[in-house]
Amino acid sequence: MIQRIQTIYLVISAIIMGALFMWFPVVLGKDGSVIMERNEPLLFGLIFVSIALAIISILSFKKRQMQFVLNRLNIISNFVLLGVFVYRLLTLSGETIVSEKGIGVLFPIISIVFLVLANKAIKRDEDLVKSVDRLR
């Protein structure tokens, strides 16, 4: 059923990643060169994959195992996105410019937390269905 708690968690995760794309700051170096921006293919692709996996997972509510696997793939893509953010921010020189713009690194972490909560809820539903099948 689509009105389960994991759907709420997945919607929140998709909204967080959408907010990351909408309000993604342009990180500039000390010399004014662009270090990171949201239209960069790697960042855009990872954010888009994360949003798409969350939406596909919401729509596949009848297939709990597939939903579980899609959420795991989404967690992996968020970890890769987080790694790209951390790598780019650590290779920059000049911390004062980056410390203002580093809030975007928290969005994938929050998304990962909601995806883990969704996986726990999916696992709980799967265990409930298996226990009812044993009684038959």
Image (cartoon, helix red, strand yellow):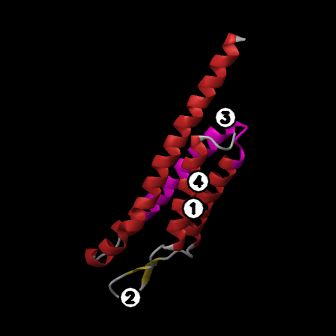
Between disc 3 and disc 4, the foreground one is 4
Q: Amino acid at mark 1?
A: Leu
Magenta residue span: 59-85
Identity, as a three-letter code, of the amino acid under mark 2 = Gly
Q: Residue 70 magenta-drawn?
A: yes
> Which residue is most to the top?
135
Query: Residue at label 3?
Result: 65
Residue 28 x/y as whole percent: 39, 82
Q: Residues within 10 Å of mark 2 (few under 14, many from 20)?
A: few
Secondary structure under badge 2?
loop
Q: Amino acid at mark 4?
A: Val
Gap in Å between the C-alphas at discs 3 and 2? 48 Å
| The image quarter in which residue 102 lies | bottom left
Q: Residue at x 62, y 52 (%)?
A: 54
Q: Is residue 81 above or below residue 88?
A: above
- Locate residue 41 relative to residue 110 in the image: left or right: right
Q: Which residue is mark 4?
A: 11
Say whether residue 114 is visible.
yes
